[in-house]
Image (tube, grey):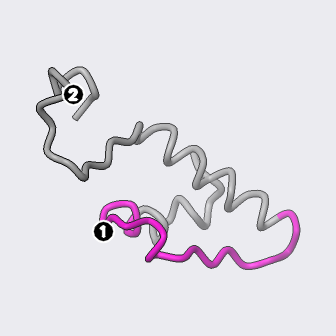
Amino acid sequence: MSLSEFGDLATISTPALALDRQKLERNIGRMAATAATKSVALRPHYKTAKSLEVAALLSSPIVGTGGN
């Protein structure tokens, strides 16, 4: 769902999390690539994400491949 599909932001129940999925995936990939160049394991903290969907992305193959 894009931000424009939300309509009036004042009508969204809070708390709410709105992310740009492409940017999120790109940032996860960049994080993984940086960790790989430093020869360290990327160990994301799922509690920090506060979202099951974001946690799933952190566990996905995108993390191991360095992104898109």
- Residue range in magenta is 37-56
> In this image, 58 relative to 33: left or right?
left
Image height of 10 relative to 18, above or below = above
State the residue at coordinates (40%, 69%).
55
Picture disc at residue 32: none
Q: Mark 1 — residue?
A: 52
User: Between marks 1 and 2, how big is the CA–CA gap?
Assistant: 22 Å
Q: Amino acid at mark 1?
A: Leu
State the residue at coordinates (57%, 44%).
26
Circle 2 Cα neighbour tier, 10 Å, few/some/many (<14 / 14–19 / ≥20): few
Pointer 1 with pointer 2, Cβ within 8 A? no
Residue 9 position within the rendered picture, expressed as x and y whole percent measured from the top left? 21, 27
Q: Amino acid at mark 2?
A: Leu
> In this image, 22 relative to 53: left or right?
right
Q: Mark 2 — residue?
A: 9
Q: Nearer the viewer, residue 32 or 46?
A: 46
At mark 1, the secondary structure is: helix
